[in-house]
Every structure is written in C-alpha cells, then in structure tokens.
Image (cartoon, rainbow, N blue to C red):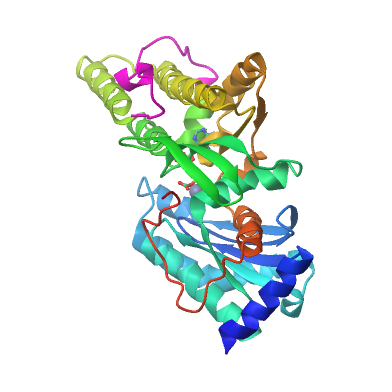
Amino acid sequence: MYYETAKIKANALINKKSAVILAIESSCDETAAAVIENGRTIRSNVISTQIAIHQKYGGVVPEIASRRHTQTVAQVVDSAMKEANLAFSQLDAVAVTCGPGLVGALLVGVAYAKALAFSLELPLIGVHHIEGHISANYLTHTELEPPFMALVVSGGHSHIVQVSGYGCYNLLGATRDDAAGEAFDKVARVLGLPYPGGIEIDRLSASGDPHAFHFGSTIDREDNYDFSFSGTKTAVVNLVHRLEQKGEIIPVADIAASFQESVVSVLSQKAVRAALSHGCNHLVIAGGVAANSSLRARLSQLTAAAGITLYAPALPLCTDNAAMIGAAAFYRLLCGDLADTSLNANASMRLFA
Ligand code: KG4
Ligand code: ZN
C-alpha cells in the first residue's frame, strides 16, 4: 500500500518536473540533512561533523561513527527542516545515501529515511554517494548539464568518469590501491598532522617547496586513466623514517608540498587528457580532495590552455554533505528510480556496470 501511494506521488512529481526533497547522508563521519528544490536550489544544508571525536584515534572508528549517527540524525533532520522553514507535510520526497560507505553508518540514515518516507507516505530515493559528489556541481553551477568528464577524488575513491547523461556513468580509470584522500590522510599522519590530513597538507604546502622531493609513481606516465598512490605514500614514509634514523630535522612543509605536487600533477594531467581524448569540453571535479587549492589552481591552468571549461563545487560542498544527495536524488526521481521499504545499506555499492 505504501509503495503504491508513493509511486502515484512520484509520477505526479515526474510530470511537473518539480520536487522538494529532504536528503540524509550518514556514510562516514558526517551526519547531514538538507532540503533541496528541483535538484538545484539549497533550501537548507545542515552538517554535524564527528571529526573532533575521531581525531584522537587518527581516523574514523566505524562503531563510534554509527553510534554517533543514531544520536544526532533526528536533531540534524529537524534543523534542516527548520532552516528550510518547512513542515514535514510540505516535503515531496525523502532521499538517502545507501552506499558505498561504512555499513553501520549507512544503516542509520537508511533506517531513518525509510521510517520517515513510510510515515509521511512519500517517495523514497536511494542515492549512490559518488553520484552525490558529482551532483554537488549542479548546486554550484546551475547551468551545468551532462555530458561532461568528471574527476572524483574523495577519501574512498579516485575515479575518472565519463558522464553522458543524468545517471549514465562510464568508468574510464580508477586508483589501483589507495584513494587520493586516503593517501593525503596517511601522509599527514606520518608527518604528525591531525586527521583529516588533506586540508592540513594543503595549508602547510603553501610554505613548502613542491620540487624538494620527487614522489611520483611509474603509473603516472602510463597512457591510461588509472592512478596509484600507495607507492607515493610509502616513499614519503620511507623518507621520514630515514631522516628520523639519521636524527635530522624533518622538512615537513617541503615533504607535504612535494607529496601534494605528485598527486595533483597526475590527477590533473590524466583528467584533462581524458576530457580531450573523449571530445568533452566540460570537466567537473568532485569529492573532498576537490577542495585542494593546488588541484583547483592546476586544473584551472590546464583546462584554460586546452579550451575546456572547469567546474568545481563550492568548497563546503566538496566534502560530505546531504545537499549533494538531494541534487542527485532529484534526477534519480525523474528517471522513476524509486526505492521501497526493502532499501538496504550497501557498503560496496557499484555505480558503474
Ligand atoms: O568526499 P569526502 O568528504 O569523504 C569521502 O567520501 O571519502 O572526502 C574526504 C577526504 C579526506 O581524505 C580529506 O583529507 C580530503 O577529502 N580533503 C582534502 C582537502 N579537504 C578534504 N584533501 C586535500 N586537500 C584538501 N583541501
Ligand atoms: Zn564523500
């Protein structure tokens, strides 16, 4: 009965191509809720971060993350509704990240969204986290439409994806080991910087020499769209250990800047090459590492020289948030992609065939 009612409501929304969607995101260490109108307008965007809680462990502790999500999800959803100045009865649909991510963390958002959709008799939309990251660009650049090439660089993923339409993704390349953000976080840890390390390395690199050390990987020169950051990370770890053994001072800023340079250089070169060789003159970046100042600057230079338009999300929309999930959900809804109450969390959910 619930699903039939939700389907009728969804069809009406599809016909008028308009929906106010409450979105929930809890795949890692941010409990987030947002209200998004027609996939493009942010009515509210609330994020409760757990960074301070996980910082003392040097990374996210899954069990603590899930418990914290259960404690905060209701409050975060209520704040998003208040900020949007809406009553629950004014919502058109409920969306939630259902994967990939930490399974216990995902389950909190999924269970909450299902209960809400069921009790309000609203359509329910399950969203892939990476599709959310890409869709953050629809909120910042309201004119942006597929087709485009996307470089997705987060704590868990490093992908080059050809986006040929809403919901149409073709994976051209990916990391063979660590994700870019993961490498930033691990290198930061070795350098004694707090979690999450990406932003710390970004900040510190401003005062370092990016050419002091060379940390590249052989895959960087290969004629494909794949990445490998594990060797780069190990090279940094070995250098730090060697210097420590010799009792030398660790040139932290130079190491940070050189590491960042090696990552930024391969990401930007391969992304621009992918766009050019597939006849795409729009390149989109997404994910937490898309906040990196050096990556944004390098890609601006390379795309300008190649006649490509570069799109990056506003800084607060690069890292995990629910606004991006609401944007992605709108286009899922228009495709008639509805979930029912059997929706489950999928820790290794796939976006590509
Ligand atoms: O997309 P995100 O919030 O979470 C995942 O889906 O994984 O990405 C988090 C990652 C972390 O690894 C963090 O260190 C990295 O994004 N990050 C950055 C910067 N800001 C966040 N990496 C490099 N430079 C930054 N400014
Ligand atoms: Zn993310």
- Main SS class of the magenta portion in the image: loop
Q: Nearer the viewer, residue 243 or 332?
A: 332
Residue at 31%, 35% (x, y): give it: 176
Residue 265 position within the rendered picture, expressed as x and y whole percent measured from the top left:
47, 19
Does any portion of residue 194 appear in the rendered image?
Answer: no
Residue at 50%, 49% (x, y): give it: 130
Residue at the top extreme? 212
Which residues, given as a range, are shown in magenta? Answer: 205-228
Q: Quadrant of residue 226?
A: top left
Asked if 121 appears above or below 265 in the picture, the reply is below
Residue 79 position within the rendered picture, expressed as x and y whole percent measured from the top left:
68, 67
Does any portion of residue 32 appear in the rendered image?
Answer: yes
Q: Quadrant of residue 292?
A: top right
Asked if 291 appears above or below 142 in the picture, the reply is above
Q: Is residue 241 magenta?
A: no
Side of 55 where 117 appears, left or right:
right
Residue at the left extreme? 245
Residue 249 position within the rendered picture, expressed as x and y whole percent measured from the top left:
33, 16
Q: Nearer the viewer, residue 61 or 270?
A: 270
Side of 71 where 185 appears, left or right:
left
Residue at 73%, 70% (x, y): give it: 13
Q: Nearer the viewer, residue 243 or 216?
A: 216
